[in-house]
Image: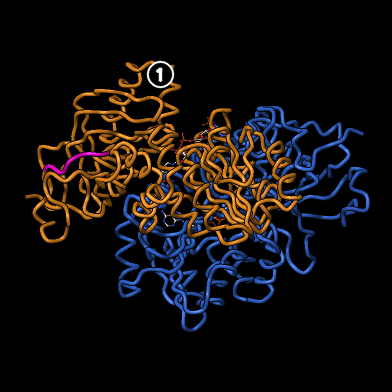
Chain colours: A blue, B orange
Amino acid sequence: MLKGCKYGTHRVIEPKGVLPQPAKKIDNNMDVLYDNEILINVQTLNIDSASFTQIEEQAGGNEEKIAEIMKGIVAERGKHQNPVTGSGGMLIGTVEKIGEALEGKTDLKIGDKIATLVSLSLTPLRIDKIKEIRKDIDQVDIEGKAILFESGIYSKIPTDMPEKLVLSALDVAGAPAQVARLVKPGDTVLIIGAGGKSGMLCCYEAKKRAGVTGKVIGLCHSQKSTERLQKLGFCDIVFSANAQSPTEVMNKVAEYTNGQMADITINNVNVPDTEMTSILSTKNTGLVYFFSMATSFTKAALGAEGVGSDVTMIIGNGYTKGHADITLQLLRESEALRNIFTELYA
Amino acid sequence: MLKGCKYGTHRVIEPKGVLPQPAKKIDNNMDVLYDNEILINVQTLNIDSASFTQIEEQAGGNEEKIAEIMKGIVAERGKHQNPVTGSGGMLIGTVEKIGEALEGKTDLKIGDKIATLVSLSLTPLRIDKIKEIRKDIDQVDIEGKAILFESGIYSKIPTDMPEKLVLSALDVAGAPAQVARLVKPGDTVLIIGAGGKSGMLCCYEAKKRAGVTGKVIGLCHSQKSTERLQKLGFCDIVFSANAQSPTEVMNKVAEYTNGQMADITINNVNVPDTEMTSILSTKNTGLVYFFSMATSFTKAALGAEGVGSDVTMIIGNGYTKGHADITLQLLRESEALRNIFTELYA
Ligand SMILES: NC(=O)c1ccc[n+]([C@@H]2O[C@H](COP(=O)([O-])OP(=O)(O)OC[C@H]3O[C@@H](n4cnc5c(N)ncnc54)[C@H](OP(=O)(O)O)[C@@H]3O)[C@@H](O)[C@H]2O)c1
Ligand SMILES: NC(=O)c1ccc[n+]([C@@H]2O[C@H](COP(=O)([O-])OP(=O)(O)OC[C@H]3O[C@@H](n4cnc5c(N)ncnc54)[C@H](OP(=O)(O)O)[C@@H]3O)[C@@H](O)[C@H]2O)c1
C-alpha cells in the first residue's frame, strides 16, 4: 500500500508543496488508496452557505445548472472548492475502507456513519451522480466517494437526532463553540446574520454566556428570519437591516446601546461587504469574530485602520476543540432550537 | 462649504452606501473641499509592500511601466488601491488647507508636515507627476494632492529623525504595537518574514516582551536579510526558508522548539500562500497574527480546520492605539534598529 502524508499532501497535484486546502487541484482517484486514508461512501454534501449562494446565483436558480457547476468544480479541482468564494462545506457518509496504517489509531470501523468536520475545500471527492438538490438548505444528495486524511476530523452521527439536522448543525459548529469561549457575563453582543443557521446557534450561546447583565442584539435580513428569531426569544433585541449598509446599522446599534456599541460582534452572513458594518458597530476596544466565509482580509484590516478603530478581529477558524459535541449539546439542551432546526433542516 | 461625513462617505462614487475603503471608485476632485476635510500637498507615497511587489512584477521591473500602472490605478479609482492585493500604503505631505468644521477640533495647522496613518486604499489622491521611484524601498516621490477625512489618523513628522525613515517605519507601525500587546514573558515567538521592515521591528519588540525565558525565532528568505537579522542580534534563532513551503518550515520549527512549536506566530511576508506555514508552525492552542496583506481569509479559516488546529488567528489591523509613538520610540531606543533603518530606508 502507498504511504500517505498525515495532512494529505500526497494527493496534491498542483501546485506542488502546498497543502490540499490551498491547492488548485488534488488527486481524486479512489481506486488507489493510501495506507492512512479513510474511504467514505458519500450520501449528502452540505455546501457552505457562501458557496451555495454564489453557485445558485450563477445558475440563475436552475437545478440542472447547479448540478453542472458542482460537477464542473469537482472535475477541475478534485474537490468541491468554489473558485469564487474559496470555501467548501462538509459531508455525511459511511466508512467503506480504512487504510492499514490507521489500525489501532482510529475509533472508526467499516459501516460507521460519519460527518466530516474538515472542509470540502480540501477533501478528495468523486461525484458519480447528483440525486437531489435541496436548495433551501444548501444540501445535495449524491452518489460518490470521498477521502478523509489522517489529520482530518470527523464526528460519528448520533442516533438521537435526524441525520440532516446533525449535518446542518455540524457544518457551522465552529461558531457557537467560539462564542462560548469569547462572550463573558455582562457583554453586549451583536450577531449579524442572526436568523441563519450559525446565527441562531450563536444567539442562543451568546445569551447563555452574557447572562442577565448582558445584552444580545440580533441583526436579521428578511422579515421571515427576523420574526423567527424574535419568536425564539434568545435575543434582548432583534432588528432587521441590510448588513451591507454600515452607517445605517451603526446608528441602530448606537441607539440600542446608548452609544456604547457592542463589546463583541459575531458576523454570520453569507454575503460580501459587511466588514465595515461589523467594525463600526463594535467598540474601539472590542472584538469582531468573522465567521462569514465572504469576509475579505484586506477590507477588514484596512477598513478598521481607515476609521481608526483598535478593534481586535478574529478569523473564524472552522475548528474549535470539542465544537461538534458543544453544538449537538445545544440542540439537546434547547427544545426551541431543536424544533426550529428540525423544521428548517431535517 | 459642503458638509462632509466623518468617514468620508460623501466622496464615494461607487457603489453607493459603502465606505471609502471598500468602494470601487471615490471622488478625487480637490477643487471643491468639504468642510471637514484636510487637503494635503503630497510629497512621497509609501506603497504597501504586497502592493508594490505585485505592481513591480506586473511591470517587469520597468520604472515607466510602474508609473503608468500607478497613474492608471488612481485614474480609475480616485485612490491608490491595488486592484489585485486590495491594499494601499501611506503618504507624507504638508497640510495645505483645513476645513472650517475642524476648527478647534484638530491640532494641525497649515504648513505642518504629516504622515497619514490611514491606508492609501481609502485616501482621495490626485497624482500630477511622478518624480522618482525608489524600487528598493517601495517609495515614490510625486507632485499631487490628497484628502484626509475627519476620522483619518495621522502623525506629525518628528524632527529628530530623517523623514523617509519615519515614513518607512510608520507604514508598518501596527505590527510592533500589536506584538507589544500579544507577547508575554516566556513565550516562544516565530516571526515569518523577519528580515523585512515590519519583521525587524517585530523581532526587536518580541524579544523585549518574551524576555530571557522566552525564545524569538526569525524566519528570513534571502541570504542578505538572514545575515542582516543575525547581526542585529534580536532573535535567539535566525534561519532561512521559503515561507510558502509549510511542511519544511514546520519541521524546522519543531526542531528549534523540541516539538513544542510556537506560542505566537507573526506573519510579515509580502507574498501569498503562507497561511498553512503559519498555522502548522504554531501550537494548537497558540495564536497567529497575520500582518501580511497577502493573507487569504478562507485559506486561513479552512486551512486551520483542515488540519484540526484550534489556533486563534488575528487579522492585522493597521491601527493600534498609540502605534505611531510606540514604533518611533523603538527607533529611538535601539541604535541598531535606527542604524539599519537609516541605512535601508533613509
Ligand atoms: N468559518 C468557518 O469555518 C465556516 C464554516 C461554515 C460556514 N461558514 C460561513 O458562515 C456564514 C453563515 O453560514 P450559515 O450556514 O449560518 O448561513 P445561513 O444559514 O444561510 O445564514 C446566512 C444569514 O445571512 C443573512 N444575510 C444575508 N444577506 C444579508 C444582508 N445583506 N444583511 C443582513 N443579513 C444577511 C441571511 O438572512 P435572511 O435569512 O434573513 O436572508 C441569513 O440568515 C456563511 O458565510 C458561511 O460561509 C463559515
Ligand atoms: N496590516 C496592515 O495594516 C499592514 C500595513 C502595512 C504593511 N502590511 C503588510 O505587511 C507585510 C510586510 O510589509 P513590510 O513593509 O515589512 O515588507 P518588506 O519589508 O518588503 O518585508 C517582506 C519580507 O517578506 C520576506 N519574504 C518574501 N517572500 C518570502 C518567502 N517566500 N519566504 C519567506 N519570506 C519571504 C522578505 O524576505 P527577503 O527580504 O529575504 O526577500 C521580506 O523580508 C506586507 O504584506 C504588507 O502588505 C500590512
Quadrant showing the N terminus of chain A: top right
Q: Quadrant of residue B166?
A: top left
Q: Is residue B93 left or right of residue B57?
A: left
Q: Amino acid at mark 1?
A: Ala
**Residue at the spot x=13%, y=56% of the render?**
B102
**Residue at the spot x=53%, y=71% of the render?**
A183
Q: Quadrant of residue B92?
A: top left
Characterize the magenta stretch by its predominant secondary structure.
strand
Q: Which residues are magenta?
A: B92-96
Q: Is residue B52 above or below residue A41?
A: above
- Residue A142 picture location, percent across and down: 73, 43
**Residue at the spot x=35%, y=68% of the render?**
A253
Q: Quadrant of residue B93?
A: top left
Considering the numbered disc 1 on the image, is that residue within a helix, a strand or a loop? loop
Q: Is residue B325 visible?
A: yes
Q: Is residue A309 left or right of residue A160?
A: left
Report how many numbered discs are placed on residues in the image. 1
**Residue at the spot x=73%, y=63% of the render?**
A162
**A113 vs B3, nearest the viewer:** B3
Quadrant showing the C terminus of chain A: bottom right
Disc 1 packing (10 Å; few <14; some 14–19; many ≥20):
some
Q: Is residue A171 visible?
A: no
- Residue B39 picture location, percent across and down: 15, 43
Q: Is residue B67 above or below residue A276?
A: above
- Residue B95 picture location, percent across and down: 15, 44
**A29 vs B173, nearest the viewer:** B173
Q: Residue furthest left?
A: B1
Q: Residue furthest bottom?
A: A212
- Chain for disc number 1: B
| Residue under pointer 1 | B59
**A186 vs A162, nearest the viewer:** A186
